Amino acid sequence: RRLIVAEVFFYLLTESRLDDALPGLLERSLERGWRAVVQSGTEERRDALDQHLWTYAEESFLGHCFDFEDGAADAPVILTTTDANPNGASVRFLVDGAQPGDLSPYVRAIFMFDGHDEGQVEDARRHWKDLKAKDHKLTYWQQSEDRRWVQKA
């Protein structure tokens, strides 16, 4: 019996940047009791997210570490540029052009892409087609003008 990921979400960023939207989605994942891994397309983006997740709000931060650090197995959130999953995450975020590996170990996979970056939009379309052909359950979300997520497909 072939395992498939329960859900794959595509989030189109139109009204905010990744730095604004990602922390809230990570917080909601942790509230569900899920561990998360965030796969970035570049080391530069990964390192920028590392700094941002410690300082994005005065009243809170998201505990995290890199996939190659000691203690990664116990971290609630992992940052990586590979398909590593050292903390046994239930949800995988793919950002900034990250290329997915095997998504079957996850309850949910989330592609976040910038609607103002044609390359990211084209990548998302390609991933949608590839994952649909593999019978994954796909949903597409877009930001409204007030930055709320609205399901479009």
Image (spheres, rainbow, N blue to C red):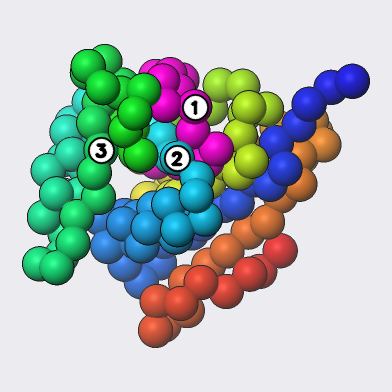
- Quadrant, the N terminus: top right
| Amino acid found under the numbered disc labelled 2 | Arg
Q: What residue is rendered at 25% in x and 55% in y?
A: 19
Using the rendered image of the protein, determine whether residue 99 is visible from the camera's viewpoint: no
Residue 5 in the image: state x and y as whole percent: 70, 36
Distance from disc 1 to disc 3, alpha carbons, whole Å, reads: 14 Å
Report which quarter residue 134 is drawn in: top right
Task: Kindly indicate the quadrant of the structure image that contains residue 14.
Answer: bottom left
Q: Residue at x 26, y 22 (%)?
A: 71
- Please identify the residue farthest to the bottom as the structure is shown: 146
Which quadrant does the C terminus fall into? bottom right
Disc 2 secondary structure class: loop
Residue placed furthest toward the right: 1
Tags 3 and 2 in contact by the CB under 8 Å rule? Answer: no
Say if mark 2 contacts mark 1, CB within 8 Å: yes
Magenta extent: 80-95
Query: The disc labelled 3 sits on which kind of residue?
Result: His
Instruction: Give the residue at mark 3.
Output: 64
Residue denoted by label 1: 88
Helix, strand or loop under label 3: loop
Mark positioned earlier in the residue sequence (1 or 3): 3
The residue positioned 20% from the left and 49% from the top of the image is 53
Q: Is 122 covered by the magenta stretch?
A: no
Q: Residues within 10 Å of mark 1 (few under 14, many from 20)?
A: some
Provide the major secondary structure of the magenta segment.
loop
Q: What element carries label 1?
A: loop
Q: Mark 2 points at which residue?
A: 35
